[in-house]
Amino acid sequence: MWQEIKSKDDLEKVIHLSDSKPIVLLKHSPRCMISSMAKRRLERETFSDVEYAIVDVISSRNVSDYISVSFDVKHESPQLFVLSKGRAVAHTSHSGVHSPFIKDALSELSTSHQ
C-alpha cells in the first residue's frame, strides 16, 4: 500500500505524480504509538483512486523537514497531507489522521474540479 519516500528525489516524483491523481502522504514515526495507531487506521479503509506514500520521520528526517518547508506547514508526527497538482490541498496531524479526513479532502477536490 505505501510507497516509501526516502529521498528528496522520491518526494519530487510523488509530487509530480499528484498532477495525475491525488496522493496521501503520511509523515510517520515508528517510535510513536499515536503515529502507529494512525497508520493502522488509514490501512483499514483505503481509497482506490489515490496513491499512498509514507515518510519515516526518524530515518528520513531531511525529507520530513523538506516537506515542511515545501508546503509551508509546521512539522508534526503523525502528519497527513493530501497532495494534488503539486501542492498540499489539505493537511492534518495527530488525532485528525484518519480516513474520513481523506474522504472529505477528496470530496472537496472533486467539487472544485467540476
Image: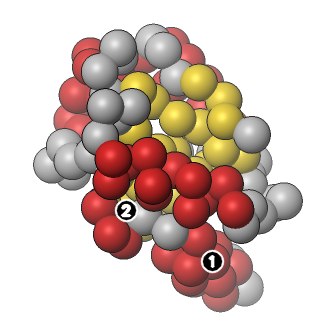
Would you name the residue on which mark 1 appears?
103
Q: Position of residue 26 (x, y in %)?
A: 47, 45
Camera-side residue of 59 and 44: 44
Q: Nearer the viewer, residue 57 or 107?
A: 57
What residue appears at the point 69 percent right and 79 percent down from the top-left corner? 110
In the image as oriented, which residue stretches furthest toward the front?
33
- The image quadrant that residue 60 belongs to is top left
Q: Is 77 drawn above or below residue 31 in the view shown?
A: below
Query: Looking at the picture, does residue 2 appear above or below residue 10?
Result: below
Whether residue 96 is visible, yes or no, is yes
Q: Amino acid at mark 1?
A: Lys
**Residue 102 in view in this figure:** no
Mark 2, secondary structure of its residue: strand
C-alpha distance separating marks 2 and 1: 12 Å
- Residue at left 31%, top 31%? 31
Q: Is residue 88 above or below residue 7?
A: below
Residue 91, disc: 2
Q: Is residue 29 left or right of residue 11?
A: left
Amino acid, disc 2: His
